Image (cartoon, rainbow, N blue to C red):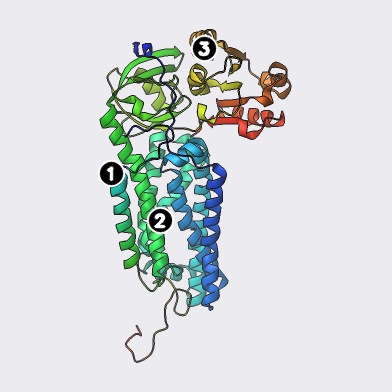
Amino acid sequence: MSTRHRGDTPTPSRVGTVLFALATACGLWFGITAPDVSPVAPPGSPGAGPAPVAGTGDLP
Amino acid sequence: MTTTDAWTSPPRTHRPSAWPGVHPATALSIGALGALTVATWPVVVAGLEPGGHLTALVAHVSGMLAGYGVLVLMLLMARTPALERGVGADVLARWHGRLGRAVVALVLVHAAAALTGWAQLTGAGFVGAAWQVLGMPWLPAATVGTVLMVTAGVMSARAARRRLRHETWHGVHLLMYVAVALSFAHMLAGPDLAGRPALQIGWALAYTYVVALVLRYRVIAPLQQAVRHRLRVAGVQREAPGVVSITVTGEHLRDLAAEPGQFFRWRFLTPDHWSTAHPFSLSAAPTDTALRLTVKELGDGSRDLQALPVGTWVVAEGPYGAVTPARRTRRDVVLIAGGVGITPMRALFESIPIAPDGDLLLVYRARNEDELVFRAELDAIARARGARVAYVLGPDRAALSRAALLHNIPDLVERDVYMCGPPGLMTAVRGTLLDAGLPPAQLHEERFDL
């Protein structure tokens, strides 16, 4: 821990900076790779994505 | 038992941390605004994409709120300096307990409404719907997470917790992190976030940042402090039946910026204690070479500490607590202590600044004379500082009634009041003080029912 005095602006530590970078990278990765269509939403309900179209190979 | 001469060092000059605290009202406002936003979003989605049922909307709103609540629960316990300093660890722990009950209820409502909605939609019975839902991606893990969460919630109920060893409860409670990890993918794949990359990234970042805070302040900071300060038990001094003071010495203690009135979470590295950190207040103003805590025997853990070997390595997490001299707003001060709540009050009594024309009064309540701790030290401090100490003994709290307090301290409402004691006493005296006209901003309290 660094020595700080009254009125000093706290500066981020090296550990804090590394953790922030890791958390940002992990958060972006989790968010970007999250599914576009919710597997728990019934077809036609909010979050279910576009309805499958017959003849396009979308139908299960 | 041994003693130490560490107290020959003069108390260190008060030097508060540079981290600003977040006011409780600000924290509550931000938290409530977040909850409102999160609860409103599924309603907006339902409006944009009509076709859902009311049961499904209940499932969505409760699910989103539960996910947000879990995030806030972790943040409250992340030990971030801004919250610990501004709100106080005792208040954060109470918020955590109340919100935890609400989150468990929301998770159960979410599961029940989702199953009911699925059963209505598919025409399958409740059991059939449950079977289908369990076959969906990430739902088995989320279900295990829910079971863990409910188990930890039930074990945290007051009646259950009284029957459990602290270590058992703590171990089960840590499984909440596993529960969160198991449920995380289900959150991101929920109907209200799926297909909206900005929201999914925002939600994921909120979680990873909070986890980073938990790691920073609950894991890395204690390890860094352990390496830098090399704390060891230097002495164990019996103060009263079942009460001991433990003196811990180490290096670079000035860097801890500990203040009188604060506490640390102490982890004594013995076979019985290394796995659990216990919160104990500093019972004397910290010096550059020593910290002192005082422990009353209240359970298995604190009983074993009474015979702690000298030389034991110690990991101290902290300092925490917002009831410090920095809260001071008035010239004169009253300190009110009940039972072992005397520990932080003794540290403040020793070191809180008093003006030449100012008055410092310590009111110390105990059931009988045998329960009084530090009597000789308190009398010596009072003589040395020109302060006063009043011992209030007896089975009832008549001496702390509104009439008695105003009779003995006519200028009560003009003072700062610092208070620490058992929850029952604190609640009663708090009501009495506010009823007597003490402005809430002048009341600074710490409860030790963490």
Q: Tell me: A49 left or right of B449.
A: left
The answer to whether mark 2 and mark 3 are in CB contact below 8 A is: no
Amino acid type indicated by mark 2: Ala
Which residue is labeled 1 in the image?
A: A14
In the rendered view, does B439 fall on the left or right side of B14? right
Assign a secondary structure to mark 3.
Answer: helix
Marks 1 and 2: which is nearer the front?
1
- Counting the numbered discs, the total is 3
**Which residue corresponds to mark 2?**
B206
Point 51% across, 61% down: residue: B38
Measure how far apart labels 2 and 3 are at the Cα level: 48 Å
Q: In the rendered view of the protein, which quadrant contains the N terminus of chain B?
A: top left
Q: CA distance from mark 3 to mark 1?
A: 43 Å
Callout 2: residue from which chain? B
- Write down the chain letter for disc 1: A
In depth, the one of B341 and B84 nearer the eye is B84
What residue sits right under mark 3 in the picture? B378
Q: CA distance from mark 1 to mark 2?
A: 21 Å
